Image (cartoon, grey):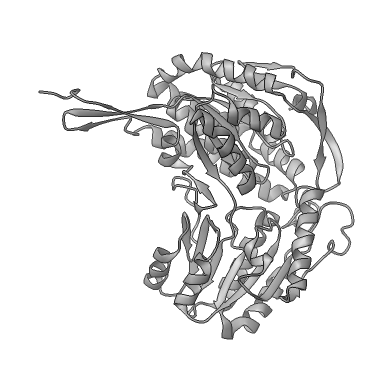
Amino acid sequence: MSNDKGMKYFIGGSWVAPSAKKAIDVINPATEQPFAKVALGTKADVDRAVAAARAAFPSFAASSREDRLALLEKIAAIYKRRFGEMGETISREMGAPLSFATRFQAGAGMGHFRTMHGILKTYPFEERHGATEILREPIGVIGMITPWNWPANQISCKIAAALAAGCTMVLKPSEVAPFSAILIAEMLEEAGVPAGVFNLVHGDKVVGQAMAEHPGIDCMSFTGSTGAGIDVAVRAAPTVKRVGQELGGKSANILLDDVDWTKVVTEGVKLCFRNSGQSCNAPTRMLVPSKRMAEVAAIAKAAAESVKVGDPSAADSEMGPVVSDLQWRKIQDLIQSGISDGATLVTGGPGKPEGLNQGYYVRPTVFADVKPEMRIAREEIFGPVLSILGYADEADAVRIANDHQFGLAGYVNSSDVERAKHVARQIRAGMVTVNMANADPSAPFGGYRQSGNGREWGQHGIEEYLEIKAVMGWNAA
């Protein structure tokens, strides 16, 4: 894939020039230097892409299950062949260590195509309900807006579900990290996805707003910040289109009083800092018994200081830079607020790690004695910053975990699995992980409250893109 691909859009099965000449630099966050440009689209580009998607919809909606299975299988095979290239692309554009970007980031993207292939084999598009037949039909053209933090993952889960459902689509990836989307577009083209079924338009909020408002788009699927998600929903409202939102998070990690403290605290710190803390479901609020605060802080300090921060291309790098200068400055502001608000700075703090003056690197930071009302306990930092909060008892831990505007994920750790499950039932979040279980790509992904509406991944991902039709008398005797 050449760097000049950022100056083309994929519309109607062809790579085409944008309608305007405006472009911005794509920055490597490890060097702070541009390595390519990406064209910024306009409403005219969105109109072209939507027209192509609408023209392709009738025939693709009528395609057979077998045709769609074949497409997903081809895409997964091509993805496997270009797997290393995807890891390199993600690492360069958003800063994740190469090993992590390849194994986890690229791996998550390929996993969605494989998982969706398995689900599509038996998904019940038709269901008998007495004399009535319930039909699940593709909703139409999907507008997709994806962020930079897990690009292949978030793009692939939407595309795989849309293909399985029989929908056509227009994708606007983040202009900060656009090349993973271009690589996926090349894969779809090589796999023979029919012209107009998938369309790619780069751009900033101008393109996203045009998509949300467009009467030719039937459903918006948005992943990103809560503020931007609200804007999409408001702009989509006049056309009464469906809006799916996967938004912010500030997930609580409850450590009950019977755990192996060294093990679970260390795991919690490492998971919080994974991907430089740039994961919406990261366990950024660690809840521990107040009497254990000093012990937990000491373990967390050792775990944080063991994280190897450095060049993403280095074999031993565990944490790269955050994605941009804007993001770096936001994180610095929130770290300073934690200090100003009176939290105990255990390790890390403002500035860049020693010896890393170039690149958007953040010091792995741990705060103890954090109060629920502090900014570092309320706002999504999206960086390697852990807040440790104390609780009085199990009920107090649940109360603190749920007393938040977000409800994307939660974590419960206990040596007693039944006790952990009892607490998990009480957490008001879309996803709860017991004892650091592995992620399940077939499980629904999404949250409560201001963490969004709807679910992605697996069977629930298909259903986001289907309309339900009841046909009475279909099964009449």
Is 120 positioned to the left or the right of 376 in the image? left
Determine the residue positioned at 89% across, 61% down. Answer: 355
Nearest to the observer: residue 175 or residue 72: 175
Where in the figure is residue 456, as x and y percent of width and height?
48, 42
Where in the figure is residue 172, as x and y percent of width and height?
65, 31
Nearest to the observer: residue 350 or residue 320: 350
Q: Farthest residue to the bottom: give it.
A: 291
The quarter in which the N terminus is drawn is top right
Nearest to the observer: residue 77 or residue 5: 5
The quarter in which the C terminus is drawn is top left
Where in the figure is residue 357, as x and y percent of width and height?
89, 57
Is 102 positioned to the left or the right of 253 in the image? right
Residue 2's image quarter? top right
277, above or below 463, in the image: below
328, above or below 153, in the image: below
Q: Is residue 321 visible?
A: no
Q: Farthest residue to the front: give it.
A: 238
Residue 34's image quarter? top right
